[in-house]
Amino acid sequence: MYYHQFKIVLQEVPGEISLCFSISGCFLRCDGCHSPQLWKEKSGTLLTKKKFEEYLSRYDGFATCILFMGGEWHEEKLIELLKIAKHNNYKTCLYTGEDEISQPILKHLSWVKTGKWDSKKGGLDNKNTNQKFIQIKTNTILNHLFQKHTLQ
């Protein structure tokens, strides 16, 4: 499994400081995708167990969540890394364009964002989006956390 980019992000998982790995090899190729560089298989750097553990150690006590942008197509490897993250007391999240994720992956996640990008429906900040941000433990959709509320 290769990652094209690593970032520390604050908005993708509300209330969490997340270590975000953008995984290459996405086959969905959503029209209007903001990261078409992720379509190419093996683009970027190989995400070894050792390198992943180094990131977890480096940000221990600072970051609270591990976020994978894709990677569900590498199910065994993704599950291995999710287990390591949880063992190191990180919460876990997967952003996917798929509508459903396998149970073996879901059981290692705290949250999942599902749904292909549709420019007509927008992202999680749009009330009309087809995407869902779900807390796994309660199976609760938390899209409202991304939407701006105005006082009347």
Image (cartoon, rainbow, N blue to C red):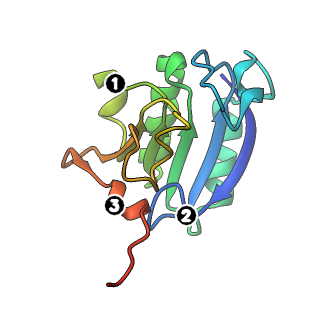
Could you classify mark 1 by the number of other residues whose Cα lies within 10 Å: few (under 14), some (14-19), or many (20 or more)? few
Residue drawn at 32 percent across, 32 percent down:
106
State the mark number for residue 100.
1
Residue drawn at 47 percent across, 19 percent down:
75
Residue 46 visible? The answer is: no
Give how far across and how far down residue 61 sits, in percent.
56, 68
Give the amino acid at mark 3.
Answer: His
Residue drawn at 73 percent across, 15 percent down:
41
Q: Give me the C-alpha separation between circle 3 and circle 1.
A: 20 Å
Q: Give me the C-alpha separation between circle 2 and circle 1.
A: 25 Å
Give the amino acid at mark 1.
Answer: Glu
Nearer-N-terminus badge (3/1): 1
Nearer-N-terminus badge (2/3): 2
For this orientation, the residue located farthest to the right is: 44
Provide the residue designation for mark 2.
17
Nearer-N-terminus badge (2/1): 2
Element carrying mark 3: helix
State the mark number for residue 120.
none
Please say if the residues under marks 3 and 1 sit with CB atoms less than 8 Å apart: no
Q: Give me the C-alpha separation between circle 2 and circle 3.
A: 19 Å
Look at the picture and state if 60 lies above or below 2: below
State the mark number for residue 144.
3
Q: Nearer the viewer, residue 42 or 86?
A: 42
Give how far across and how far down residue 94 sits, in percent.
47, 38
Give how far across and how far down residue 64 sits, in percent.
50, 61
Locate residue 105: give its quadrant.
Answer: top left
Element carrying mark 1: loop
Give the amino acid at mark 2.
Answer: Ile
Q: Nearer the viewer, mark 2 or mark 1?
A: 1
Look at the picture and state if 46 lies above or below 86: above
Element carrying mark 2: loop
Q: Is residue 147 left or right of residue 52?
A: left
